Amino acid sequence: MERFHSFPQKHARHRVVGRSLSLGNVDLERCENKGGFELDKEELIGEDRGGGGVKESEEAEEEKDVSAASLSAEIDDFIGRVLREPPEETVPVFPQSAVEKFLDLAEEMVAKHESGEFGILSSPENGELSLFSTIDLVVKLASAAGGLSSAEPECKRAMNRAGGIVHRSMCFLEDELHILLDQDPKYKVDPGSARSKSKRPSSFDRSSDSSDRFVLPSPESNSLDLAPETLAPEMVEELRRVVGAMINAGYTIECCQVIAVTRRNAFDAGLSSLGYEKLSIDDVVRLPLDSLEGEIATWIRVFRQSVEVAFPREQDLCFAVLAGQEAIAKSIFHDLICSATIPLLTFAEAVAMTKRSAEKLFKVLDMYETLRDILPKIHALLRPEPPEENHDGEPSALENLETEMASVNARLAEAAVAIFCELENSIKNDTTKTPVPGGAVHPLTRYVMNYLKYACEYRNTMEHIFKEHRNHGSGAKNGGEDGNYFASHLVELMEMLHANLEGKSRLYKDPSLNSIFLMNNGRYIMQKIKGSGEIHRMLGDSWSRKRSTELRQYHKNYQRETWARVLGCFKDAGLQGKGGTGVAKPALKERFKSFNAMFEEIHKAQCLWVVSDEQLQSELRVSVSAVIVPAYRSFLGRFSQYLDPGRQTEKYIKFGPEELENYIDELFSGNPSSLVGRRK
């Protein structure tokens, strides 16, 4: 359909829309027709429309009596004769009077709609044509008049006037289209799930070393709804009529611009209502960790809802409004998805560029999985063109977007591998020379094991990205017999942690405390592995058996280093009297004194030692009691009779077997305790 530009119009615009019109303004001063001659404004815009002459009152009254239906019938006949195939031998007579009267009615109708007097879908009365029927007829008239070879001024003047009415009506319809699309459907936010202002829990925080509390943020928390409201059927019909009229008049580009810009603005407003803020790459790179994690959580929620909810609704809207114009609807929808998705991909790319930090791993993996899950849904929404339909051979919108998404996801995968490998440096660089008080579990052990436990919840993803990383020649470690490069990294990290803890155990001067430290950390590691089936499967049974054997050896070392000297006090050797008969009381008294001092010293020191694992604590106390109490009871049974009853007995025999067992049960509590003054 031929387009009409810069036609004069009779009326000033009656409505003001707060935006820049793509159609622009019409020049009322001068309009040059296609034939090269100029028409004065006086000829085109006057109080009367009869070609410049003063009409008689009778003629005016007669014009009022002429129905729009009869005028349209006459004009339809003229248009049909002009466009007839094969063309008539004689040029059809131009119905000037009917055309002028019809254009008067058309201008009046457009003016009434501009003023808001009539609704756009108002039913015609008294034989009048509807707005859309009138516009359609004016468009056809302008096209038919332009096709005449005649150079009659009346015909050209009518053509120009019709073109001006078309342009004016298109400006009005463009405004209507903008208003309708801007009003509804809007993106809604459930007021009951407004964005929380509280600080979102960190995905992983090393500052929580002293605690094993490790909570995964719920994906349902702080959820919002990103979805345009459903259009009412009458709204769809109104939009279809407006769009159809603009396309039929040759204003397809302007129509598409209004739809694309208005819906993109509505989509951006929806993102803003969810708390999503567009940030530049520099802004993202400078964000502190807590703020970045919050932005990532919002990004994940927004991206998923965009693809799963908002985009399908926008697709329905496009194809409903542009019914019968599938190619145009498809083009607008594809452009919307691409223009809305690229900024979201830019954010993901910026996150991949931020400084490597072990705490960021899990958020980066969340983003990676989000893009991985979204890509097939984008593919389904854009419905790729068959090869035979892609005539120019250029990549389609889908191919370009998929390429960009794959590229960004590759950067996220690379960042995740690099961040995980940073954990090796964290272990290597933890060379503190200050031992943990009481031989307790070291913060590094807690941090690494919690980190790995959480990382293994992403096992499938981690295995995939490590394999891809290896395939791209990254120099990743060997994947073992099953080719699992992530598992290989995990085993190496555990070996590095073990070696680091062995070195830290040597910071304790007391060999017994050295063993307690290794027991504490070893038991903590084994409990974490036992509680995570993923880690256990990746490390394997042989690794677990080896570590269990080491734990038993640490226990034996503790027993030997601490209680071997105590058991030496209960030996008979050195207690015989002269001539090998009887008991040497001085030696016996010294033996009791030695035991008492030794036990009090051990009790005082080891009550301060920490064994937080209740099972290990109980095992240690039971094993000590099982060795010491029976030996002490036997020693008392053999030698207490040789001490004089009364004060001498109380002086040297300070503990009964039951009391000794109670005192042993106070060991490893981490609380200061002393036996001095506790016995009367």
Image (cartoon, rainbow, N blue to C red):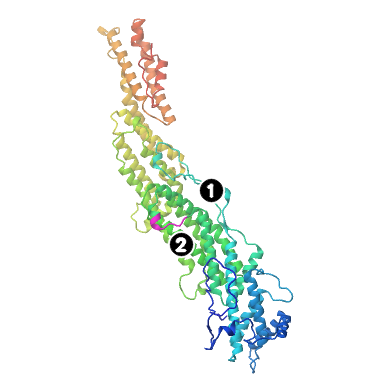
Residue 674 makes an appearance in the image: yes
Indicate the position of residue 86 as horizontal and vertical percent values: 63, 90
Q: In the displayed structure, would residue 524 be above or below residue 42? A: above
**The one of 322 and 645 positioned closer to us in this rendering:** 322
- 580 above or below 313? above
Task: Estimate the spatial distance between the alpha carbons at disc 2 and disc 1, rounded to whole Å.
Answer: 25 Å
Which residue is painted at 48% across and 69% down in the image?
396
Say what amino acid the circle numbered 2 marks: Ile
Quarter of the picture containing the C terminus is top left
The x, y position of residue 210, in whole percent, is 40, 36
SS at mark 2 in the image:
helix
Foreground: 301 or 417?
Answer: 301
Q: Is residue 19 magenta?
A: no
Vertical comparison of 386 with 548: above or below = below
**Between 369 and 112, which is closer to the camera in this rendering?**
112
Q: Residue at x 48, y 64 (%)?
A: 339
Quarter of image, res 580: top left
On the image, numbered disc 2 is attached to which residue? 342
The magenta-colored residue range is: 277-283
Residue 631 relative to residue 26: left or right:
left
The residue depicted at 38 percent of the width and 27 percent of the height is 670
Give the residue type at disc 1: Glu
Q: Nearer the viewer, residue 499 or 304?
A: 304
Counting other residues with Cα less than 10 Å from the Cα at mark 1, is it few (<14), some (14-19), or many (20 or more)? Answer: few
Quarter assignment of residue 181 = bottom right
- Count of numbered badges drawn on the protein: 2
Seen as rendered, the residue at the extreme top is 645
Question: Where does the image place residue 114, in percent across and percent down from the top left?
Answer: 62, 71
Q: Residue 154, relative to residue 124: is it above or below?
A: below
Image disc number at residue 220? 1
